[in-house]
Image (cartoon, rainbow, N blue to C red):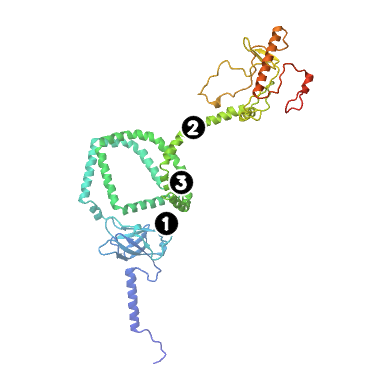
Amino acid sequence: MRRNQKRGLSHTTVALIAIVLAVVGTYLAFTKRNPFADRFEIQATVTTANQLKAGTSLVRIAGVNVGKVTNVDHIGDGEPAAKITMEINKSALPIHKDATLKIRPRIFLEGNFFVDLQPGSPSAPNMADGDMIPINNTAGPVQFDQVLGALQSDTRKDLKTLLSELNKAYSNGGAQALNRTTKNWEPAYKNSAIVNDATLGVLEHDLSGYLRGAGRVAEGLDRNEVQLKSLITDLRRTGAALSEEDEELSRALAELPRTLTAGMPALEKLNGALPSLRRFTAALRPGVRSSGPALDAQVPLLRELGGLLGRNELGGLARELRGTVPALASLNKNTIPLLEQLRGLASCGNEVVLPWSKDKIEDKDFPAPGPVFQEQVKPFVGLAGESRSFDANGQWFRVALNQSQFATPAGTDTFLLTDRPVIGANPPPPKKRPPLRGEVPCETQQQPDLRSRAMEPPQPSFRIGEPTSAEGRKRQAKSMRTAIKWLEEGYEQQGKTKVKIVDDLLESKELPKLRIPGIEKVSR
């Protein structure tokens, strides 16, 4: 025998290879699973597994098999909830974070079940290998025994009561009334369709935002079960109260068509304003979002203002002023008439008195050098010095004597002697006093006019000359003696006895010989 002859496989090796191939073939035949394939697994928590079987229950997307259930792990003993593991083919990827699934029967009512998977929206992020679909995104089928279990004895009793009340309502004219309302169904359904279409929203994410808000509301209701029960109880009481007032409710419903007729134009105008309101709301959203930081920045200011209003600050001041505030309010109320009078006085000064004071009176006999407001204060100078005795403004009266040139009759036997003829009174006295009208405001009255024409003198003046008759010369001599005697007595009372008074008239050439204290020379 040759030593280098090649030997074949032993019988033991061949047997082991055959056993391994048989095991692998049997595994692949029963599991239909490629152990060398790259698998993608996701998990989900469901409220009920509904007889899902690991390895046999399929996973479908839009009716196409994309995988199968590989594990069903029940949560707790006797609980229908379970955690399932699914193997998904690579061709079915991607699966998104907002994916949902439902367990559906393959045969009507009962039979095998499969998992109907919705991969989610493309805008959501992709799920990774081993990620979990939450229980809120899963749903189970309603089985026939659950339908029968819903109709318990109390439910069936309530259903009988409902049907009985519907029978009563339809038997007492309700059916005819329902028939009459059919003509209003078309606009009602039309408007309902418009409302349902509006619920989809106009802007992006309107519907999703509404669903999120509705979810928060439902979550809030679920957290407050006691209050929700009270709400349902109160609704039942409200329904009972309405049923007791069925006649009044019927009359109110009879008025509803007229109310709708009157309200439809207003609703149409409101509907026309909604697009503008939506645009305004969209434009307002950035401002509302930015108001958060502004409000946060105002919190310290409000906190400081709160301290300012405390007991030690304005609160204490308000408490101290509590007794004074009513008096101040009364003073404020009573000050209004005074302010009105002051306003009238100020307006009178601005509109009447001030323009009059700037007027200037032109008089050829007594010319005024300045306006009224300058001339009217000049008499105050003499009044201010009336009690002084060392000058001409003292309490002594000085009389300047001169020779009268004109005489004006002042009665039957008296004359007014003046050095100039009397030209008349200026201004002339009014014929009657003007009426005093207190209801006419001063600010609306006519400005006073000081310009006037002198009144004619009552009697014409005539010049005085030397008396021509004997009687005239006699009276002139008598008046001269009387005047000299009055002067002598006055000087004697003052102790001036060295003064000599004569009745001879001085001639013009004798005037320079006079010596008067304080006057150096006497001119003609």
Name the residue type under label 3.
Answer: Thr
Q: Residue furthest bottom?
A: 1
Name the residue type under label 1.
Answer: Ser
Q: In which quarter of the image is the N terminus?
A: bottom left
Looking at marks 3 and 2 on the same chain, the residue that comes earlier in the sequence is marked by 3
Classify mark 1: helix, strand or loop: loop
Looking at marks 2 and 1 on the same chain, the residue that comes earlier in the sequence is marked by 1
Q: Name the residue under label 3.
A: 281
Q: In which quarter of the image is the C terminus?
A: top right
Q: Give the image quarter of residue 49.
A: bottom left
Position of residue 307 measured from the top left corner of the image (x, y, whole percent): 43, 51
* Mark nearer the viewer, 2 or 1: 2
Within 10 angstroms of label 3, few (less than 14), some, or many (20 or more) residues?
Answer: few
Q: Name the residue under label 1.
A: 121
Q: Are marks 1 and 3 in contact (CB under 8 Å)?
A: no
Classify mark 3: helix, strand or loop: helix
Q: Name the residue under label 2.
A: 338
- Along the line of sight, which residue is nearer the eye, 412 or 8? 412
Q: Give the image quarter of residue 496.
A: top right
Within 10 angstroms of label 1, few (less than 14), some, or many (20 or more) residues?
Answer: few
Position of residue 476 measured from the top left corner of the image (x, y, whole percent): 69, 12
